[in-house]
Image (tube, rainbow, N blue to C red):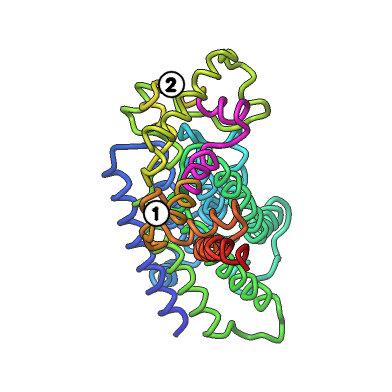
Amino acid sequence: MEHIFAELISTATIAIAAFGIAGCFMQRKHLTVTRSFAAFLAAVVVNNIPEALNRAFQNMQVEIAPPVDVLLWLPSALCLAPLFWIYVYRVTSTDGRGPKHMYRHLALPYVAFVAGTVALVSPASLWTEIMPDDSLAAFGWWTVLLVVVALLQLAVYPQMAIYLFLIVRRLTRYRLMLRDIYASTEQHELRWIYVIGVTGALYWLVQALVLLMAFDPDQSRVPLAFVVLGGLASLCLVATTVLWGLRQTPPLMPESEVVSMHSPPNEPTGDKYEKSALSEEASARIARKLRNAMEVDNLHRDPNLSLWALARHIGASPNYISQTLNEAMGENFFDFVNGYRIADAMTRLSTTDETVLAITYDVGFNARSSFYNAFKRVTGQTPTGYRKTLSLRDGMDDLEPELREV
């Protein structure tokens, strides 16, 4: 029963991943990012082929099926985590480049591919002797090969945990980088990757339990519930990744027409303005233009305001604007714009009868929760509480003449 279920899950996973690959190659923008995503999905397809063709492999001669399974499953399993990490790195970068020394991340898959290839071209008699009773009856280089394959299979689990940690750390850094470019970051925060991480952690846990049970001599077979849970987790993981991955554009990479006018801000590495040619006089001039854009032109009321849009408006480089904000004004782009939004909201709360929700959108916030969090962080009060405080104060001011007469 579990074999049939596993085959169905693997076949469905292959179909979804293949659809995602086709979608990647239909896109014409951000090719390095989409190709990285396609490479990850291709590894998913290869990884599920042995399970999807399980019965076909069983009908093969015994000396053919095991090395084919090792050659397909093991390298692809070791590719999944690093390829997804490379995709996340590229989608959260400012130029679409991957991590440095990328070949290091694929070292284990290379070793697994070589081991699988050696197993495939090995004499058939070796598999005939070993596979029926799963014993290490062989000796010499063949024993070494089997030990290497076993160690690589075990390496899948710690590798996945390490890359989950790297992805979370990368996303934490990415959220800070968003604040240098966007005044509203909610729609760019890649929360779907956190969902992928949680689902991946669940899948990792189930597979680790299955592996532990496999080493238990008292456990004759893995419970069907674990097979079902692991299969569904894998299917949900791939489906969610394809659904959101095809819709994802790199938020830190500007559109092509913006690139032609201004270079995108660089990722922070050490002193990121060390080689900047921006003078103090030019920085002061940019600071005046920035304040004028908010106080006179009210650009902060644009909910989609970005560093690139502001750069076009005042005619300055995004790098110079970012440097001016960080060094001369002591703020990032997010705090600078939202400071004007909060000031605008405070004025409206004290001078108009508009609802809090109407004020939220009028001053540039695109979500009520974001407005409440930002307002409380600046004033220590909620917008409703702030308005009530003003009403009480006005009431006391009205009573002051009467109190003086008494």
Q: Residue 308 sits in which quadrant? A: top left
Measuring from the top left, give residue 274's x and y in whole percent. 64, 19
Residue 233 or 174: which is nearer the viewer?
174
Q: Secondary structure at mark 1?
A: loop
Q: Secondary structure at mark 2?
A: loop
Q: Amino acid at mark 2?
A: Ala
Instruction: From the viewer's perspective, tell me whether residue 182 is left or right of residue 354.
Output: right
Q: Amino acid at mark 1?
A: Asn
Residue 341 within the segment the image draws in magenta: yes
Label 1 and label 2: CA atoms lie apart by: 26 Å
Residue 158 or 323: which is nearer the viewer?
323
Mark 2 lies on residue: 316
Residue shown at the point (43%, 70%) measured from the top left? 54
In the rendered image, the quadrant that contains the C terminus is: bottom right
Residue shown at the point (63%, 49%) measured from the top left? 169
Q: Is residue 319 above or below residue 135?
A: above
In the rendered image, the quadrant that contains the N terminus is: bottom left
Earlier-in-chain disc, 1 versus 2: 2
Measuring from the top left, give residue 243's x and y in whole percent. 36, 59
Residue 393 within the segment the image draws in magenta: no
Measuring from the top left, give residue 246's x and y in whole percent. 35, 51
Q: Are marks 1 and 2 in contact (CB under 8 Å)?
A: no
Q: Of the numbered discs in the image, which one, if any, rests on residue 366?
A: 1
Residue shown at the point (38%, 44%) measured from the top left? 301
State which region is magenta: 321-342
